[in-house]
Amino acid sequence: MNKQKGFSLIELLIVVAIILIIAAIAIPNLLRAKMAANESSAVGSLHTINTAEAAYTSNYPTLGYSADLPTLGGASPCATAITTAACLIDDTLANATTVGTSKSGYYYTYLQVVSGGVGTAYSNTATPANQGVSGQRNFFTNQGNVIRYGSTGPADVTSSPIQ
């Protein structure tokens, strides 16, 4: 009797095929989970910005809302808050204003409304850096502190609020 040691080529091919099938099932779920995490991070970031804007208007009432996102941030260690670097949000979020500087797959577009030299209103949108890969939905918020989403395009003040 001749005893065989190891595995045959067919057995190895079957194992590899099973691994590939499992990977084909698992990878799309992983990508969807990553998009959901990025979207959740974007909503959290918009909430953080809303809270920082309330603090900014409280600290600098003669200026109103901040001029832009970098104004709410500040380079680390951020020991002294000033009107142009208020140290209210993380500098990574404050500078996530382009696709290249996105935070968790989203970048933010901030607009301030000025009346009489005072920031009277603002709006902020969160857009996926790579639509359909880093996130699916777009988000919007303003001084009303309601975060809204758009599933098929940009979100605005008329979009559905997040429940």
Image (cartoon, rainbow, N blue to C red):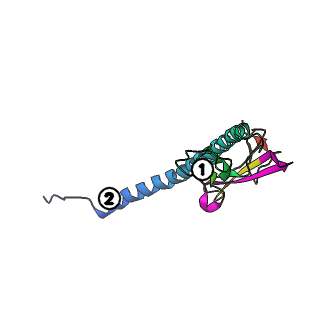
Per the rendering, the mark at residue 74 is: 1
Magenta-colored stretch includes residue 118: yes
Of residues 101 and 158, the one drawn nearer to the viewer in this rendering = 101
Instruction: Write the start and end of the magenta stretch as one range.
Output: 98-122
50 relative to 32 in the view: left or right: right
Per the rendering, the mark at residue 11 is: 2
Residue 71 in the image: x percent, y percent?
Answer: 67, 50
- Density class for disc 1 (Cα within 10 Å; few <14, some 14-19, many ≥20) is many
Q: Nearer the viewer, mark 1 or mark 2?
A: 1
Regarding residue 32, the answer to whether it shows in the image is yes
Residue 124 in the image: x percent, y percent?
Answer: 73, 49
Residue 34 in the image: x percent, y percent?
Answer: 56, 49
Of the two numbered discs 1 and 2 on the same chain, state the one appearing first in sequence: 2
Label 1, secondary structure: give it: loop
What residue is drawn where x is 68% and y is 47%?
83
Of residues 44 and 143, the one drawn nearer to the viewer in this rendering = 143
